[in-house]
Image (cartoon, rainbow, N blue to C red):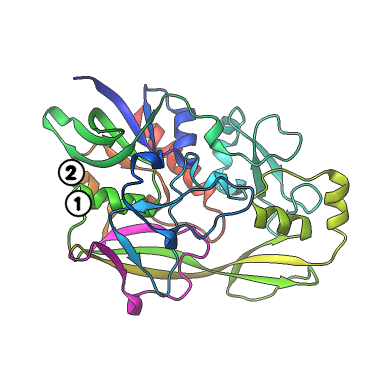
Amino acid sequence: MRIHETIIVGSGFSSFILSQILKKKYKIISTNSKYINFLSKRKILTSHLKFFSKKYISYGAYKYILKKSILHDTLIHGGNTNFWGGICDIAKISKYINLLKPIFQLKKINFIDTGSSSINKNLFQIQSLGSNNGNILNCSNYFTNVIKGHLVSFSSEKKNLICLKIKKKIIKNYYCKKLILAVNAVQLIDILINSNIINDNDHIRMTEHKFNTKITFSNKNIKNSKIYLILSYSLAGIIKHALGYQKNFNKYIFNFLNLFPIFYHQIFYKKKILATYKVDKNIQAIKEISKKTDFGFGKSIHYFNMRINNTIVDKKLKKINKNIYGISSPFILNKYPGPISNNLIEKAFLLNKKLT
């Protein structure tokens, strides 16, 4: 029986950052949908597909019944970095900046170079190293030590080992001393149900900052004391963002598009909103509890602080095994409104310190 020191499950941004700084030996489990395409398609969870982005489908045994909220399952190698804008608040990660220089480069956002802008002067776009054309970082291109498969469930074994059931052509057992979960909220829920950590009738709650969008024909400041951050896009930025195009157009086209006075604003509010879901194993569904869910929850895709029956998900895992950790957005306890990448970077560095 082979025992791995560390296994990271997931191949999104949080997994990428940790894999770049982790000094211990590790393997990464990256889902390939062909291993689970016998399960039901969940089209309701694949709502942010874009023209130039890689296509993906959410598969799972549990369907989602949603009325007021929106959830996403980017079941694809690289996770949300296949679609995102890669914005980071560098003021929140200032002590890690020098350590990040060998991993990616940062470009201060502005309409001329990135098609985006903000009053917050600490917002930078995360770009691939050596990028001369504004290539937004897509971490799917940089992973090593990858095992293609899908984590179905895990359990704690004797001698403090963790057993992972990985679906490839067949289900195989993998063993590790430390398990790190870097998966999105939907995938985490699937895994925890299969691992008997989330049970029938359990309530799952998550938090998000209120989020809205607005189109204007002027870039004058939108004033509202309830607003924490506004991220604005010029016409060139709007087209890039809408199509999922992760590099700049020809500079002449880019500059020409920016002549048109139309702006798209992402507005992040100070107010936190909540969503609550209930597991119903009789009909194999995750049902939104609408009276405990704020309308529009999930629009920003930056939901965090997952709780199971009001217990922080990390504490639930520690009861199973002290060497199970989480670094993706469901494990973030608190954050400022706006970009979540700086929280994921901080989470990865703090875990790396704990593991060394």
User: Mark 1, mark 2: which one is toward the viewer?
Assistant: 1
Q: Residues within 10 Å of mark 1 (few under 14, many from 20)?
A: some
User: Residue 143, image x and y in percent?
Assistant: 49, 29
Is disc 1 placed on a helix, strand or loop?
Answer: loop
Q: Is residue 259 above or below residue 13?
A: below
Q: What is the magenta range?
A: 282-310
**Residue visible at 41% across and 46% down?**
328
Give yes or no for residue 330 being in the magenta stretch: no
Can you name the residue that lies furthest to the left here?
158
Sequence-wise first label, 1 or 2:
1
Q: Which quarter of the image is occupied by the N terminus?
A: top left
User: Residue 80, image x and y in percent?
Assistant: 52, 48
The answer to which quarter of the image holds residue 219 is bottom right
Question: Which residue has dot 2 on it?
Answer: 320
Q: Which quarter of the image is occupied by the C terminus?
A: top left
**Residue visible at 23% across and 53% down?**
193
Q: Residues within 10 Å of mark 2 (few under 14, many from 20)?
A: some
**Residue visible at 78% across and 54% down?**
111
Can you name the residue that lies furthest to the top here?
2
Left or right: where 133 falls relative to 294: right
- The amino acid type, in three-letter code, at marker 1 is Ile
The answer to which quarter of the image holds residue 243 is bottom right
Q: Is residue 244 above or below residue 286?
A: above
Left or right: where 50 falls relative to 68: right
Residues under numbered marks 1 and 2 in contact, where contact means CB atoms less than 8 Å apart: yes
Is disc 2 placed on a helix, strand or loop?
Answer: helix
Q: Nearer the viewer, residue 319 or 233?
A: 233
**Residue visible at 80% across and 72% down?**
217
